Image: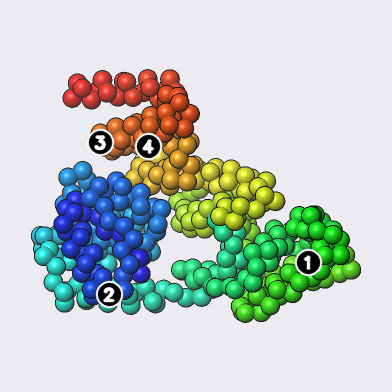
Amino acid sequence: MRAILIDDELLTLDFLERKLNQLSKINVIGKYTNPHEGLIAVIKEEPDIVFLDIEMPETTGMTLAKEIQKAFPTIKIVFVTGFEEYAVNAFELQVEDYVLKPFDDERLMKTIARISNHTMKKMTKHIKMICCFQQLSFTYYGTKQEAIDVNWRTSKARELFAFLVHHRGQFVRKDIILEHFWADSTIKNAYAQLYSTIYQIRKSLATVDFNIKIISSDNSYKLELNDVVTDVDLWKKDLEEIPFVTKENIKRHKELLELYRGDYFEEEGYLWAENEKNRLHVDWLDHLMKIADYYINIEKHGEAIILYLKMQEILPYKEESYFKLMKLYHTFGDRYSVMDQYKRLKGMLNEEYGTEPSQEIEQWFKEWEQAQAKK
């Protein structure tokens, strides 16, 4: 299990990390004294567990826990506190557990055992799925995704399989495949390499329990997925069925947002996938902003903040996310975060483009500073 620790005391973070390493197989993937940086890390990494201090100077653990629970209901939260009277509040929020400082080995072991049992129960298999978002992979998609290892004998076999997934259900002419993959080879060598690579793909597919077939005709190949789905098809289908965000379907919209783990074959760098990658990216951004606007309209600004932080993580050079977050943090009365977003925006624009924020943003920030000075 992967964990993130958030506490304003560095000594506490170091001590808790050592204890978790000694007592369990929990992998601490990040520890933060700044709660805002910790929240960004949770959005980016989506850990299994967050150990969260209740009393922090810039915000409370209760507030942070609510934001995490709304955005990622499967993440387990354990409160860390020096005051036992917080236990009632902790369980009202339905967090997984709370542990008192200084840490007791036996109590910490009970917490770890409780989390482990709940996590194992939820790892159920559902849909057999090929993932194209971020990178090519095979998973069982359900309450929790389970990755399946596939041994690709060559990178060419992996890419050709991805190319056939890209054209799934269609016959792709062999000469088109040769142009994409072996343009520099002689015709004879190119065909030999194509047949060898198709053989390798079939051997790799035979190692997983997915009913996928490569159909061969005289001059073409077609990939039949049968009962296997792709994350792209599942994502597009559900978006078409629920185009508007409502109270009744918001949960499904958030699940779809998480299904989009990254751009189409982003980590693979396939040139032939660029057009589809750009098109899907625009659709994803539109979807995220629809959900964020829904939360703003019903005045759930914490949820909107989490979404725009996610957008900023994936699109760090888009000015709009910084401005939206400045306004949302202002609604919360969080002066520190308004300033932080403005500084981040100025730094990003200066470093990447040698420019300043737009006149609209500068004017808004100037008026905001003046209003703060009068308080």
User: Is tag 3's residue or tag 2's residue first in the polypeptide sequence?
Assistant: 2
User: Is tag 2's residue or tag 1's residue first in the polypeptide sequence?
Assistant: 2
Residue beneath disc 2: 24
Looking at the image, is mark 2 or mark 1 nearer the viewer? 1
Residue beneath disc 1: 194
- Disc 2 crowd, CA 10 A, few/some/many (<14, 14-19, 20+): few
Mark 2: which amino acid? Answer: Ser
Residue beneath disc 3: 336
Residue beneath disc 4: 325
Q: x, y (%) of residue 104?
A: 13, 71
Distance Cα–Cα, label 3 vs label 4: 12 Å
Above or below: residue 124 compared with residue 290: below
Mark 3: which amino acid? Answer: Tyr
Mark 1: which amino acid? Answer: Leu
- Disc 4 crowd, CA 10 A, few/some/many (<14, 14-19, 20+): many
User: Is tag 3's residue or tag 1's residue first in the polypeptide sequence?
Assistant: 1
Residue 217 is left or right of residue 283, and the answer is right
Distance Cα–Cα, label 3 vs label 2: 36 Å
Distance Cα–Cα, label 2 vs label 1: 48 Å
Q: Is mark 3 on a helix, strand or loop?
A: helix
